[in-house]
Image (cartoon, grey):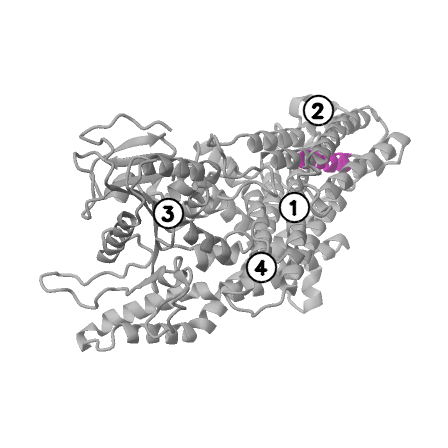
Amino acid sequence: MPERSARHGDQPRLHDVVQLRVHGVSGAQPAVILDRAHTRQVAGDGSGGFHRADEPDGTDPNGVTVEAYRWGDLPSGTVARTISMVFLLPFMLSNVAVWMRPADGRSAGGVAMLCRLLALNLTAVYVVAVAGVALDLVAWRCLGDTRCRGPFDTMAGLDDRHVGQRLAALALVPIAAVVLLRLLGTRRSRPADNPLWAVEPLVGRLRAIHVAGALAVLNLVLLVARRAGGATVATTLLLVLSAAVLLACVGLLAAPGLIDQVATARTVTRSARATGVAAVGLSVATLVAVARDERDWPPSGGLPGYDGVAGTVLLGQMALLVLLSGLVLWQRGRVDGRVVLRHGLGAAVIAAIAVGLAGALSAGLTYQTGEVLGGYFSDGGPPLPYRWTLLAFFLHVGAAVLLCGAIALLSRSRRRRAAEAITARDFPAAPPEAAGRLRQATRAIARARFTEWLGVLAATYAVLTAVGLATSLLGLTGRQPEELARVVGLPAEAVGMGLTAGTYLVAAVVLTLLTFGVFGYRTAWFRRHVGILWDLGTFWPRAAHPFAPASYADRAVPELADRIIQLAGRHTGVLLCGHSHGSVLLALAVLRLPPQVRRRVALLTYGSPLDRLYARLYPAYLNEEMMREVGQRVGWRWINLWRDTDPVGGWIFYPNRPGDPPPDAADPAGAVDRRLRDPRELLAAPGDHLPPPVRGHHPGESDPEFRAAVRELVRRLRDSGSAGHL
């Protein structure tokens, strides 16, 4: 990418080093990253740009030219788009889950297959929920019924039409919803010329499969309802063909490795497109058949057969989730934070959250729309599957809160003892007046160590998927949730209170998502604390759900690699400094550099989650083998700074704590990690009013330890003998 014209003597110097800083998911401004009041952009654009200090001498205290890459706006968009994508959060989570598959090839394929089937099921849940509003609530219950609020009782004159014509007309609403998903899945941010992920052909195949599956499910809703009044040859044939299209979609995703293999790519692409064309043709035929069939419809409080279709879709969702959880729990390994997540358990947990959100949003849509239109009437209530879904959501949330609280309490003493041992080694002769500060540091370390218990928390939470399966099975039996109270010996009002609480919880979730969508990229506090989840979720490309947001790493990593190549051609070396998630982007960028450039590159990471979180959550991709390859490519000119008080970042290869056995001297990875004592001192230095703060996950570019690491890596770059000009 071309660099803007230099100002204030910013001509490249052939005998200096450039420090390129990359921020984490907090999205700091260039002035904060560079610690300069005035900055200017020297490359890139408004979404992802490279900045330098707008001063004659834009160097740091070490005499190194400093440049910052700000990528924080790449995952964002307009408020309307952000809100729309927030409501599709389950799709994003289901897409992230497939990247959490285990490294073990024996089960990785099964986990990927189940994640993709779950993603297809989420699309079906979306369509069934919209169809429930348009077909069950409006077309069947509201039109022509004076108890429904206007104008929905006479909408567009459809109240005088035959029921089949009403259903055919309002079936255009869920079809439009599918088209909207298709459009949202097509839009993507501008990629680099050499994108990181070569997945667009896969996304196209997945998109065709999901559209076909969505239309097939909608056809089943209409045809099952029509057959309730008597089967005809046309409806039976259309029903069989629609079911065949849906099974074809499932088969394309379930066949091991079929959709991913290069050898079968052309065949799968043609099959997916043919399935999509068949689904569109069947949808047109279904709408015509339903609209022209003037037979009487059977009396019913709700759309005939809708509860059965919705219940089957939700049951399939829970069954897939239980299979996924069982597969990853079956993996052998010690049940602790460092091992169990490496076996792909993160996929089950994230998928469970995606399923819970999808069910809650679907149930909330039907409940709240029913209230807006005048409520469900005495001749029928809300669809039974959604009543059980609301109850399951309430039970899941309650169990998750209790589970987190229980593990926090049970692990407290162990975390406290470990933290006290660390502070005792760091401050062996703490004066009495520093007792308060010592307790503060101990509490910070104890809180940060809760991350080590995420594996146990995830394993326990994965077992809760059985709750959702049980409620789905009960829903298919036709029993009301209130009957559960008699079975377990609770008052009948207890289940009613749970359903009411579930309704309020769903409303709170919707309100929260709306708030996040409006303020997530417009308010600094929201961007820093809430946007983190969005940034992490949109990091990965679409390999499971085609309607998830596009990956910003598709542009950020190649853009970083191109800039590093440019800088290495003009300077002695390039020192890459990545904080938090920025260290992940830089590690991937290093893997894309040509050999002649890698000789001029050094790497400084701090607060890095590469091992503590990413290697555990994504064991098949960001693992120790990958990180050792990064170290080898930069000639082990790599320093990683970490603190015990940091709940996110940590060591990458060896903790190197005081008292730990020294790493193998022959292993260059043993010299990468540098532990920083936090706080540096318990009491204020002479002349200072306040003691050094507890830094935790704070970047700390102005810390003396950071500057010392910069000086060391700059010296190693200059001594490496790679001063030749490319």
Residue 393 location, quadrant: bottom right
Q: Residue at x 70, y 38 (%)?
A: 263
Q: Is residue 221 magenta?
A: yes
Which amino acid type is shown beneath numbered disc 1?
Arg
Position of residue 160 measured from the top left corner of the image (x, y, whole percent): 74, 23
The residue to which callout 4 is attached is 345
On the question of residue 634 being in view, the answer is yes
Tell me whether circle 3 and circle 4 mark residues in contact (CB < 8 Å): no
The residue to which callout 3 is attached is 24
Q: Earlier in the sequence, mark 3 or mark 2?
A: 3
Q: Secondary structure at mark 2?
A: helix
The residue to which callout 2 is attached is 158
Label 4 CA crowd tier, 10 Å (few <14, some 14–19, many 20+): many
Q: Is residue 236 magenta?
A: no
Tell me the CA gap for discs 3 and 1.
Answer: 29 Å
Q: Residue at x 41, y 39 (%)?
A: 561
Magenta region: which residues?
210-222
Nearest the camera: 44 or 250? 44
Q: Earlier in the sequence, mark 3 or mark 4?
A: 3
The quarter of the picture where the N terminus appears is top left
